[in-house]
Image (tube, helix red, strand yellow):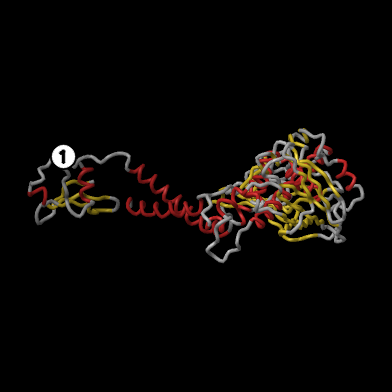
Amino acid sequence: MTIASAIVFGVLTAAYTTILAPLPIVLSEPLSGWEIDFLATDASCSAWFSDNNLFSFGACGWQNLSGLGVSTCWSSGKRLEIMTAGRSASQIVKEFKQQLDQLGSPSLQEVVEIYEMGGSTFYGSTGGAVPQGPASDKHLDTTQSYSRQANSSLDQQGIDISVSCQYINESPMTAFLDQSSSMVNVTGYCPDGQGQTWLLPNSSFIVASLDCPESVSTPNLESHLLYFSNYGTGGSYEIIGNISCEVNGSITTGHLDYNSPPSAFSWNSDGSVETRDQSFRVLENSMDALIYVLETSQSEDGNLFIDAINSIYVPFVMNQTLVTGAPQLSFLSMLETMTRGVLEYEASFLRLIFTLQMLTQTSELTKTNPCTRPLTGAMQRSTYGWEMNSHALLAFLPIGISGIVLIILFAWVILRMKSSLTYFDPTSLISLAVASSSSSLRFPEGTTVDPHDEKARSTSVKFESVSAGEYQFISKPASQWKRAYAL
């Protein structure tokens, strides 16, 4: 019975483990909140965006907005962060990873941590969006879920920017070089005749840039011409020459996903562009920021924007050709993605400022405002649990009953065996009665009878009924029965 019970117990243990052991499961929970709407149709929104746009070229500095410290300067204190975002978040590294690997490039940074968004980390482009749900900074969260460590996907508003560059014969800019001066005077004229003049540090690595807005009649579309010209003699900068880029941007919707790994946000545009007029010109302001970054990144040693591209282009791309049929890398393709990445990064900062301003001006996270839009999505978190269904219950009932019976059986056996049996004594009725229940008379070690005694080994005993309710205990020493006791 012990062997049988052990086998049954092993089977039951496997059954209990299958039914009762917690399993890894993924729980999905809906998310809802709000975000700034750059396509808001309310007449008051254009004025609200204009009044609350804190970025500026002149008087600027650090401010505390809704508990989060941000800089109202376009590039002050964050040039390196912007360049890193342009190079990695613009997908120079991510988009061309296969080609760079073939060209022998080492592993390059594919994510960027944005300090002023509470340390949020992006893999790929920011898309002009701001994290406002799980894993975001608590000062930006409008879904009341920032403290939850979970993967998530939110339907958010971003910006879709395209950049197409080509070399041109003549530049719309002119630089007046004076070797005795530490500054260079640059003048540029847009196709509409509008002119600008500005100063750049004098060096062998001078890169001038000019932004020219274009007039378009299509709703939710902004178009700009961006020019680059090199006026230095630095060898690695000669690849620039004169370049013209067409930049187009539209407010779009997509998914801002957070996944672990790599513990970073990623923007995925769904290509949906609404044909509504913008209540705030995001690309125009982002272009202003880009030009300011290009100018303030210029020094006697070069331009940080161009250096961020050349640090990849010169050692790994310039003198090499890919061995596969993949699109060939070029300085222009890298300039396009770098420009797009910085513009999307600046668009995210615009949304950040307006989000914090809106949070500062309202005490309720869910308060409706004509300049906001609903934010919806879901988060998925891993945990352990049990699958509750009728099949599991039906399987558990017989296994549970068997387990209870087995426990009772074990308890009964243990209680019955708690006192040990005495040694065999042929003078004791108990010993004789126990011996008679066997098929033959056996003498365990320690008995009072010599186990080699032929007489004892050939003796059999048994009970025999003599009348109703009375039995006699008889033995058979040889070939006949002899009465031993009457009970």
Quarter residue 392 falls in: bottom right
| Residue under the point 58% across and 59% down | 390
Residue 406 x/y as whole percent: 41, 50
| Residue under the point 55% across and 61% down | 321
Mark 1: few/some/many CA within 10 Å (<14, 14-19, 20+): few
Quarter residue 144 falls in: top right
Left or right? Give the position of 23 relative to 158.
left
Residue 446 can be seen in this image: yes
Given residues 80 and 271, the one toward you in this image is 80
* 192, above or below 196, in the image: below
Q: Residue furthest right?
A: 43
Question: Residue at label 1?
Answer: 446
Given residues 33 and 414, the one toward you in this image is 33
Residue 437 x/y as whole percent: 23, 51
Residue 342 x/y as whole percent: 71, 48
Residue 117 can be seen in this image: no
Residue 315 x/y as whole percent: 56, 51
Circle 1 — which element? loop
| Residue under the point 24% across and 54% down | 465
Given residues 288 and 94, the one toward you in this image is 288
Given residues 59 and 455, the one toward you in this image is 59
Residue type beneath disc 1: Gly
